[in-house]
Image (tube, helix red, strand yellow):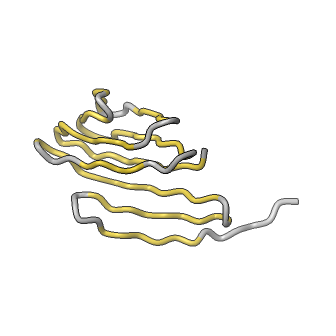
Amino acid sequence: MLRKTTPKWRHNWCIDNTVEISFLFRRETRVKLVAGLFDAEESATLNVEQGRRIYVHVARGRLTANDVQLDAGDALQLTDATSLSLTKGAGAEVLVFDLPG
């Protein structure tokens, strides 16, 4: 039986150049979206909880995510990472999804 659920959400303005939005669909299903703008020396490091998956999508520009160079339209999925490092941005607009494992 399918039932409609309304996700609970919140957003936090972070200290750096990112905004974080969390969705809670059910008690056991938490999805976090972090959006950021990166240029030149700007960087961010996100801790990854055990059992979570990370999906990085570069909408514009380019940057390095965990030592992998990504250009506009590129994506990177991490399954066993303990952290995500975003560096070396060049006009980068980035979405990071923190998903259940």
- Could you say where residue 82 lies in the image, as x and y percent from the top left? 43, 42
81 is higher (above) or lower (below) than 50: above
Query: Is 8 on the left or on the right of 84, as rendered?
Result: right
Residue at (11%, 44%) from the top-left corner? 41
Pick the quarter of the image with the C terminus.
top right
Query: Is 28 on the left or on the right of 97, as rendered?
Result: right
Query: Is 10 on the left or on the right of 20, as rendered?
Result: right
For residue 15, what is the image quadrant?
bottom left
For residue 4, what is the image quadrant?
bottom right
Toward the left, the furthest residue is 40
- Could you say where residue 87 lies in the image, as x and y percent from the top left? 22, 39
Residue at (59%, 65%) from the top-left corner? 24
- Could you say where residue 30 lies in the image, as x and y percent from the top left? 58, 59
Nearer to us in this view, 59 or 83: 83
86 is higher (above) or lower (below) than 29: above
Nearer to us in this view, 2 or 80: 80
